[in-house]
Amino acid sequence: MTKAATGEYRRFIPVGNAKEMDKLNALVEEKNLSRMDLYTILRAIKINPAFDGQENIFQ
């Protein structure tokens, strides 16, 4: 069962594919990020539309 399905990300709407979500979960665990850390990051910055889609950063 995914973290999103268990309610771990109930404050967030997952938009990534399975591979992207796996990388996010690994990063959260590796860096010991809290949900509040994720919230702060996502409220403070967003992807520059000029960058989005130009390069696949998940390879």
Image: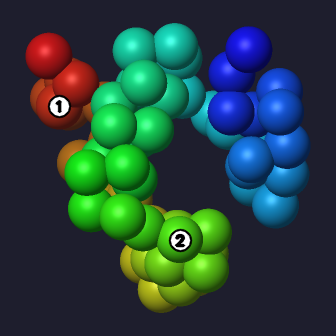
Question: What's under tag 1, amino acid-wise?
Answer: Ile
Question: What's under tag 2, amino acid-wise?
Answer: Ser
Q: Can residue 42 be seen?
A: no
Q: Secondary structure at mark 2?
A: loop
| Alpha carbons under labels 2 and 1: distance apart | 23 Å
**Other-residue count near label 1 (Cα within 10 Å), few / some / many at <14 / 14–19 / ≥20:** few
Residue 1 occupies which quadrant of the picture? top right
Compared with residue 29, is residue 26 higher up or lower down, i.e. above or below? above
Upstream in sequence: badge 2 or badge 1: 2
Report the residue at 75% width, 34% height from top. Answer: 4
Q: Nearer the viewer, residue 43 or 25?
A: 25
**Other-residue count near label 2 (Cα within 10 Å), few / some / many at <14 / 14–19 / ≥20:** few
Q: Position of residue 5 (x, y in %)?
A: 83, 27
Report the residue at 74% width, 49% height from top. Answer: 9
Please give left or right for residue 43 compared with residue 29 in the image: right
| Res 57 label | 1
| Res 47 label | none
Report the residue at 83% width, 33% height from top. Answer: 6
Contact (Cβ within 8 Å) of mark 2 with mark 1: no
Q: How many marks?
A: 2
Compared with residue 50, is residue 5 higher up or lower down, i.e. above or below? above
| Res 34 label | 2
Q: Nearer the viewer, residue 23 or 56?
A: 23
Q: Nearer the viewer, residue 9 or 42?
A: 9
Please give left or right for residue 57 compared with residue 12 in the image: left
